[in-house]
Image (cartoon, rainbow, N blue to C red):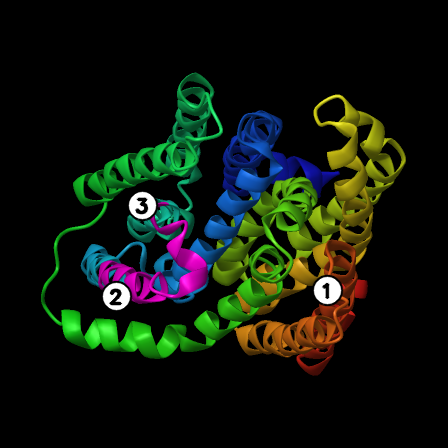
Amino acid sequence: MNLVKEIFKSNLFKNISYLFVLQLFSYALPLVLIPFLTNTYGIYNYGKIVVAQAMMFYFMTFIDYGIHLYAPNMIAQIYQDREKLSELSFSIILLKVIFCVLGFFLLIIILKFPYFREDYNLYLISYVYVVGFSINPIWFFQGIEKMQYITILGVLVKGITFLLTIYFVKTSSEITLYPLINGFVTLFFSIIALFIIFRKFIDFRLRNILGTTKKIIKDCAPFFISRLSVTLYTNSNTFILGITVGPILAGYFNIAERIYTVLLQLYQPFIQSLYPYISRTKKIDKFKFISKWLILLNLIMILFILFFGKNIMHYFFDYELVDNSFSVLQILFISLFITLPSVLIGYPLLGGFGYSKYANRSVVFAALFHLISLYLLWLFNQISPSMVATVLIFTQIIDLLYRIYGLKKIALLKLLWK
């Protein structure tokens, strides 16, 4: 009981609360938009939009370069030293801007391929969101454990994007309008977030900028490989379906994946708040308590969706869309039994204790398995939304098993069972 009171009175609980509100807006509002977008654009054009968004995730992974995993841990350790904090933060911002410019030139080259020429403007406009993402300093606020800034700005981004989309998107011919709104709203509030951190927390630091940037590139490399691997077996699914079997099936898969992602992301406030906390304190009592309740909640939510999800979807989507998406959703929700424990073990636990190599390697092995499996499905003409979702389950099992192996190697597994 004392532990419960301690958690509710702690800064950790406040950070979890702020991030939970943010996640509700970040994923619930876009989920509510899906019926509107599919009805306005049609499943074919909706599929084109989500395939373009899936491509943008590759650029976002490249630009982030694992910084969102590396930076919070480092910032939590040097928060009291404004000079070091400024030096590190300014170097990260500069590096991400450079990567963003490089990514844009790479996009121009990719769009010269025949498959992408038809929707050249759609992909180009979708990159505006990537620009906003590249300068968004969410990693900084996470590191200093000031989640209220992330929450306020994030809620404004999602709320305004939602309202503008409902108001302005009227016909199926306006396929670039939603990505345009989403991109510019994100860019605008990312600039405001940058203004806040330079006004309140850091200074412009050009001294030793080259040395600090080189160190970031070196230190973030394992995190980048880890995040790239995750992207290859998560966001790649929609993209691969889009370029192999077409935007309609990609659209069906994406709808199921979005619903699945909403539930998974509801746990992120706990994970994102625990990561800097464990990095700073190296204590696992609160981690164990929160994890037990999250796993129980996860089980309840999975059973609820499996039994009642289809009926709920019928209120928002037409019957053909539900029939094509719900079978995929069932498979994805079964995979949550595996995904949540794996995420909890990786970051915050392994990463927080300084053993991120096990978390990073696990997703590399999982990604290799996933890509080989998708190639074989394509080779034997068996690729489909349901088969891709099934492969994802086995991919996540590999990821979980290697992380458990890492816990055993560093003697943390015994502590978790005490």
- Could you say where residue 205 lies in the image, as x and y percent from the top left? 12, 60
Label 3 or label 2, whichever comes before in sequence order: 2
Mark sitting on residue 102: 2
Report the quarter where the N terminus lies. Answer: top right
Q: Which mark is residue 383?
A: 1
Residue 107 among those drawn in magenta: yes
Q: Residues within 10 Å of mark 3 (few under 14, many from 20)?
A: many
Residue that appears at 43% across and 54% down: 56
Amino acid carrying mark 2 in the image: Leu
Residue at image location 44% in from the left, 20% down from the top: 163
Compared to residue 190, the image places residue 241 above or below, namely below
The answer to the question of whether label 3 and label 1 lie on touching residues, with beta carbons closer than 8 A, is no
- Residue contact at pointers 2 and 1, CB within 8 angstroms: no
* Mark 3 residue element: helix
169 over 321 or under it: above or below = above
Q: Is residue 402 magenta?
A: no
- Mark 2 vs mark 1, CA separation in Å: 33 Å
Mark 3 to mark 2: distance in Å?
A: 14 Å
| Residue positioned 47% across, 59% down in the render | 280
Q: Which residue is mark 3?
A: 128
